[in-house]
Amino acid sequence: MQVPHLPVLRLGRSYESLDKLEIKDHRTGEVKAVVSTINAGILRKDFRKLGEARAALKKFTIAQLIEMCSKAGELFLNGTLPLGDQGHTQSPDEYVATLSATSGLPHVMVRRNMTKIHHALTHLGEVLNGLSRGLDLSIIDSGFGEQFGTKLSFFPTCQALGLVMPSNSPAVNSLWLPAIALKTPVIIKPGRDEPWTPFRLIQAFIAAGIPAEAFGFYPTDHEGAAEILKSCGRALIFGDKSTMAQYANNPAIQLHGPGWSKIIVGDDQIENWRDYIDVMAASISENGGRSCINASAIVVPKYAAEIADALAQKLGPIVPTRNDDPEARLSGFANLKMADFIDAQIEDGLKTPGAVDATAKYRNGPRKVEFEGGVYLRPTIVQCDSFAHPLANKEYLCPYASVVQCPQSEMLSKIGYSLSVSAITKDEAFIEQIQAFPEIERLNIGPVSTMKISWDQPHEGNMFEFLYRRRSIERGW
């Protein structure tokens, strides 16, 4: 049977390009789909129609769009939806198996990511209530109104939201979902190995009644990605540290790079460290270690060697299993060069004195292994003697974390930017210092996993405030 063809979706129109790429099973090399790709010239041409795309969403109230988004969530999770333009369809089980085959994520992790997306879509009313701080969203529909004892007016900051997506984890698509309910079209450059989730979401939205003109699905090259970032008015980009540096001073681009998320343990709780090994291990290893909110450092005032050893005993023996194993805990690498690079980086870092691979003696073999045709990186826990060590504040797309000993009084000055921090302490003075620390985006107090997400709170920026600005208003009639 002919493999599916995923067309470019040009704001409501399917388009087959002469230039196509093949999406392959990371283990067998089997082609799972061909995807049309386009250049920046087509994007520039289509961007002239963004006003029409926005007008298609403006016909609905936000309340209506929230209801349709909830229906889309059910369809995404449970529905059989179109896959491409040649009559293929995709059931939920087929989506799970295909995404697993091309990305390396085992089935159980894909399903967990599906559930997160479903939850975000079916709770968008609550999400927007949190992001807008309780705003009566009908004020967005009318353009002005009164609430909280004052006049309010908001206007859109862009014609569309541009998205340069990664391939590492499907749940990152949850970040852009509020845009649809906020009447903002989306222009998506999917990840090279993960077109499945954006395409399936678009089909779910369309099946739920949202106009196809509101969606752009544009597999493209670096020039095309730059055009999306430049022309949409507002954009999200996912990438590494060097990618982030290029756009660091552009407020129109919301950056989603390495999270450098951490668990810190206070002086008052460190004697109870054994009680927190499970939450540390889960923070490091859930979702195969691929998320920016996976803990990549455990910061403690003492017992670093003991904690590193306990984590190593728990995580070091983990081995690859079949993709459909419900207990699978490791993800394969579709990009084999990335696996080689990470393994080499860790090995090179270990040559610098002051670091020990605590997992080495529990791994019973090398870090990088092959299993049933796939390449995997087994968990690595490195004990570092200080934050000065090159491995102390690293983040990799696998279960990796450093354990660093540091006096409580120096922790905040050493940890740097952290997307998610779980602070295990009951010391109110220390908690007050942590709450005032500006380099933490998401904060958990107590033994809470760094992976804990509340979509009704900001995540590397507030999507409502990113897409709408308040203006002063007076009306004479």
Image (spheres, grey):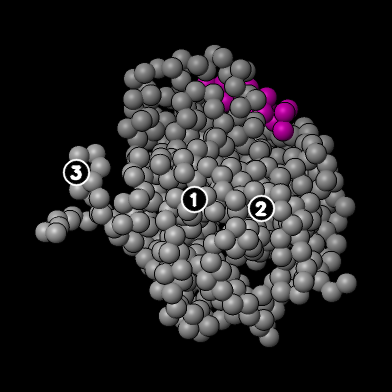
* Amino acid type of the residue tagged 1 in the rendering: Ile
Q: Which residue is mark 2?
A: 75
Q: Earlier in the sequence, mark 1 or mark 2?
A: 1
Q: Nearer the viewer, residue 138 or 225?
A: 138
Q: Quadrant of residue 20?
A: bottom right
* Amino acid type of the residue tagged 3 in the rendering: Thr
The answer to whether one can see residue 113 in this image is: no
Q: Is residue 381 above or below residue 102?
A: above
For disc 3, the neighbor class at 10 Å (few under 14, some 14 to 19, many from 20) is few
Q: Is residue 318 magenta?
A: no
Query: Residue 66 got which mark?
Result: 1
In the rendered image, the residue lying farthest to the front is 477
In the image, what residue occupies the spot 80% across and 39% down?
A: 326
* Amino acid type of the residue tagged 2 in the rendering: Leu
Q: Is residue 139 above or below residue 287?
A: below
In the image, what residue occupies the spot 66% across and 75% down?
A: 7
Q: Which residue is mark 3?
A: 150
For disc 1, the neighbor class at 10 Å (few under 14, some 14 to 19, many from 20) is many
